[in-house]
Image (cartoon, rainbow, N blue to C red):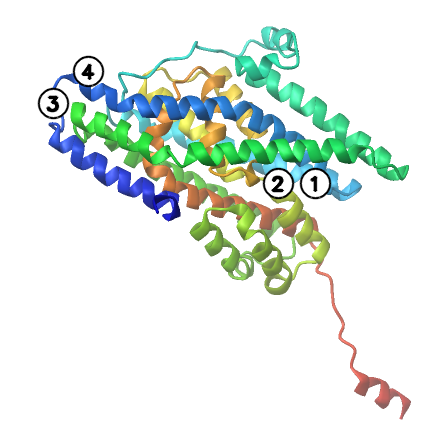
Amino acid sequence: MLLRIPLYLQIVIALILAIILGVLLGAGNPIIDKELINHLTIPCTLILKALRTLATPLIFLAIIHTFLTAQIPGGSGRKLVTLLLTNTLVAIIIGLLVANILRPGTWGNLTIESAIKAPEKTLDPWGLLQDIIPESVVKPLVDNNVIQLIFVALSFAIVLRALKTQQIEQGKSDYLPVEQFVTILFEAVIRILHWVIALVPIAVFGIVAQTIALKGFAPFQSLGIFVIAVILALFLQATYYLTRVKLGSWVNPINFIKGGSDALITAFSTASSTVTMPITFESLIQKVGLRESSASLGALVGSNFNNDGTALYEAMSALFVSQVLGQNLTIPQQLIVMLTSIIASVGAAGIPEAGLVTMTLVFSSVGLPTQYIAVLITVDWFLDRCRTAINVMGDMTVSALIDGKQQMKYVEYDPTTEVEAES
């Protein structure tokens, strides 16, 4: 019965129960031994460990699967890739700027005593160049080495895509077994991921109850500021989209919002870009008035790669946690966060709770403890809806920009004009 309740409601219920237990245990003045209270975080540690284990093979398969299955035409494809990369890069920069200016992690003491700090990592260009090629193909999966994982995944994805295109031109189908194998593996990992995600409310319950019992409610002050900061950053990203639409297409920004309102509301209510995809496609054609080819590229193809809201959120989360720990990320470390967020967002549209999964990679890339992800989940159920709406708005923006500055004129056939001309 519990599994039929939506995940966000399960998290809310777990949050309420955790608050009650935390108050009963003292709410900052623990009435029992601290070691016993710390045992509440054991489920959280195990669940996050499972997520971290799944993250690397999942992203590896997601990148290959996306490159293999996406239908990208030549000339328009290059323009599409440029727009997607630009939008994602701007989103991450906006997120980092807002997090650096507001510094939400400094507004409260949200430190977790049981958090295991990963080795600190910095951006060493020469060391990065030497380390980018792994000693074996499976080593990045074993070591959770994000940079090597990205290199191997992109290498396989680009080559397999090229081979598929070549074989289609030659009328061959040897690529099909490989594509089917990757698809089955990807779906298998997704299935296991569903099992782990079903346990996430338990992790939230344990970490929140422990924090309230030991430190009271003060530590969560910074989470409130973090929510405000993320919403502000998402609003700035939406403003950027509307500016791009105004300057780069024939579509009026007001009509753009009105015409796409169904898609944006659906994205917010379902928290799924994939579920919203057909509604976005239909809205762009029937209500905004874009050509079908433009709507298809942005809403159907681009949605597999475009996760600007998710990338923005992950970058801000990494900076937030580093501020909580009092170890602000340096500019080189923020560049690593930027790179990891961009690549990790590829193919994330089809992954359930994608931000939760890929965040483990982003945190690991700069040595941040993943235990803080469970704390972020307490507000993630709401922020997930906000960033999904931005993801969909990004798909709509790409479609409008591909449609260009000249609106396609459709002339209806009127038989009366032909009769008048003959007479």
Q: Secondary structure at mark 2?
A: helix
Kindly identify the residue that appears in the image at 22 percent across and 26 percent down.
211
Who comes first in sequence, dot 2 or dot 4? 4
State which mark lies toward you, 3 or 2: 3
Who comes first in sequence, dot 2 or dot 1? 1
Q: In the depicted view, which residue is nearer to us: 287 or 351? A: 351
| Measured Cα–Cα span from mark 2 to mark 1 | 8 Å
Which quadrant holds residue 301? Answer: top right
Q: How many C-alpha atoms fall within 10 Å of the one at disc 2: few (<14), some, or many (≥20)? A: many
Q: In the depicted view, which residue is nearer to us: 111 or 12? A: 12
Q: How far across and how far down the image is residue 137, in percent?
A: 66, 14
Whether residue 345 is visible here, answered yes or no, is no
* As drawn, 298 above or below 171: below
State which mark lies toward you, 2 or 4: 4
Q: Secondary structure at mark 4?
A: helix
State which mark lies toward you, 1 or 4: 4
Q: How far across and how far down the image is residue 30, in percent?
A: 11, 22
Q: Secondary structure at mark 3?
A: loop
| Measured Cα–Cα span from mark 1 to mark 3 | 54 Å
Name the residue carrying label 1.
70
Whether residue 54 is visible here, answered yes or no, is yes
Name the residue carrying label 3.
30
State which mark lies toward you, 4 or 3: 4
Who comes first in sequence, dot 4 or dot 3? 3
Q: How many C-alpha atoms fall within 10 Å of the one at disc 3: few (<14), some, or many (≥20)? A: some
Who comes first in sequence, dot 1 or dot 4? 4
Which quadrant holds residue 304? Answer: top right
Name the residue carrying label 2.
304
Kindly identify the residue that appears in the image at 26 percent across and 16 percent down.
113
| Measured Cα–Cα span from mark 4 to mark 3 | 11 Å
